[in-house]
Amino acid sequence: MTTLTMRPDLPDPAQSYANGRVPLGHCLVEGGVITPAQLLMALHLQQRLSAPLGEILVAQGWASGDQIQSALAAQFSIPRADFAGLRPDPALAARLTPAFWLRHRCLPWTHAGGTTLIATERPDLFEDLRPRLADSFGPVAPVQVSGAELNQAITACIGPRLARGAGCRVPARYSCRSWHWALPLAPVLLILAALTLFLLVPGTGIVVLGALALTTLMLFTGLRLVALLGNLLRPPTRAHLRPRAAQQPRISVIVPLYREKEIAAALLQRLSRLTYPKSLLEVLLVLEEKDEITRRALSEVRLPHWIRVVEVPDVGPPRTKPRAMNYALDFCRGTIIGVWDAEDAPASDQLERVADHFARCDKDVACLQGVLDYYNPRTNWIARCFTIEYAAWFRVILPGMARLGMVVPLGGTTLFFRRDTLEELGGWDAHNVTEDADLGIRLCRMGYRTEMIPTVTYEEANCRPWPWIKQRSRWLKGFLVTYLVHMRAPRALLRDLGAWRFLSFQAFFLGTVGQFLLAPVLWSFWLLLLGLPHPARDLLGTSGLYAASAMFLLFELLSLTIGMMAVTRAERRFLMIWTPSMLFYFPLATIAAYKALLELVLAPHFWDKTEHGVAAVDQKLGEV
């Protein structure tokens, strides 16, 4: 027979707890934990915060988590579970789904005297669960457990099941896990055929390759031009916004970490500047079970109560960021789910802006994308160009695309979702190395919208050539994967997106990848401006070649204009003189594109990790 370990000063667990209970606040005042004045202030805060009283008291620093747990146990006349002395039985947990235990924040502990003891973080909600639990366990009784202890027990009991499920949450028809070997061969064979033609018949080959290059360039140029006009001529409207909500929502932010030995202390310092009520905020630092490097880094810092670690059980591939986020999603308690990267420095009031926007915007707005910027633009030339590129994308192009109702490929961080919609879509595709862009497409396919919000998160610009190429190759490979997956059924995609979004989908993915893969062909047209012979001169004629060169020049002028517009803010104006040098920056992406094409065939799911903590923060930007 199992021995029950419980505190001797509390009643036997088989006893039913009283229906008439002393309020928790009174228990804490009578126990000398808080003062009457602190209780009144906490009750006043509770009127606008949709949080339990105990969590408010802990967030204010007026009580410890252990004191709240003891008071709850006394209030409901139930014992506290001793998970250290007796671990929960996984066989009992298997009687109901993992989703049930996670949703209701409880877990079966053990049997005692013919009764199944259910460890719960919220004993005030137990009576609502009793009928459902009794169907599976017979007589049940609650025991009190802290949230941290419960999370550890859930991980031990059902973590492997959750981790395996996290790898296949997205329906197969939208996921690249059902990758067919022939899919990646299509772009490869197209490029090889054109190159073969070029080798056999150089003049004709350069014309064919040039036509492909100019087509992709026109697609991407058209996308940027339309987005620019949308940004300039269609300012954001707030006519649809509703009044602010009376209570703020709970927000959970997922921060995936992997082999981060330098970033832990800086990350905690940046997150500590957040001003959102800590009783409504939880930040989940997500790491792989075997990631000893990050675990050691976190062990050297003290985490506040609103930041906790979630370890993803090692149950096999894919060991990717999106699978880790899918796993962490099950442990989130918020109605809004956010994502930050390890090196991020979000604006202190970012979460207030997110909560306010979600409360006031239309219900079909399922995602908010913040602005991404860099805190080390002065590190070197690559960092400056990277900052210009991101400023152009997040401050000019992406807002215009969102306002015009185009497909919005998401940016990977500073993303916030309505939780119910995110779960409806199946979270992130665990096998896609650009899970953010893929999720943006699936949001559009399901009829939801993404809006931009004017809040900035600073990141570390990748400022070394080879790491930059590796990162960009992962993005380009992910774009290819996302395009091929969704184009498996083009008519269904057209039906889901509509003609306008379908066209923007083609322009973004084909234009982005194609312009880099075929960039050497476009560069060849500069031979004309230098007065040098060109292989296609006889086929196209001088006028045709000059027209192609002019189009290439037009694209560069548009890029220069957008880049200049994007860095007009006071703290970024020093980058204006560097904007023309972007012409020499993007050839790095051509190397990355061919690396991506090779990996598309050989290792489509390989995740080339970006190293963080390399560059120092630019002090001229102020504290970030």
Image (spheres, helix red, strand yellow):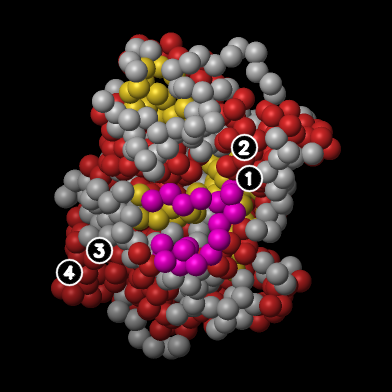
What separation in Å lies between label 2 and label 4 (alpha carbons)? 73 Å
Looking at the image, is mark 1 or mark 4 nearer the viewer? 1
Q: Which mark is residue 68?
A: 2
Give above or below for 349 relative to 202.
above
Q: Which residue is mark 4?
A: 196
Residue 302 seen from this side: yes
Q: Judge by depth and name the residue closer to the eye, 136 or 438.
A: 136
Label 2 Cα neighbours within 10 Å, binned few <14 / some 14-19 / many ≥20: many
Q: Do the numbered discs 1 and 4 sit on residues whose CB atoms are within 8 Å?
A: no
Residue pointed to by mark 3? 599
Q: Secondary structure at mark 1?
A: loop
In the orientation shown, which residue stands out farthest toward the bottom?
531
Magenta segment range?
Answer: 294-311
The quarter of the picture where the C terminus appears is bottom right
Q: Which mark is residue 64?
A: 1
Residue found 37% across the figure and 40% down from its top: 85
Q: Earlier in the sequence, mark 2 or mark 3?
A: 2
Q: Disc 2 on helix, strand or loop?
A: helix
Q: Is residue 16 left or right of residue 132?
A: right
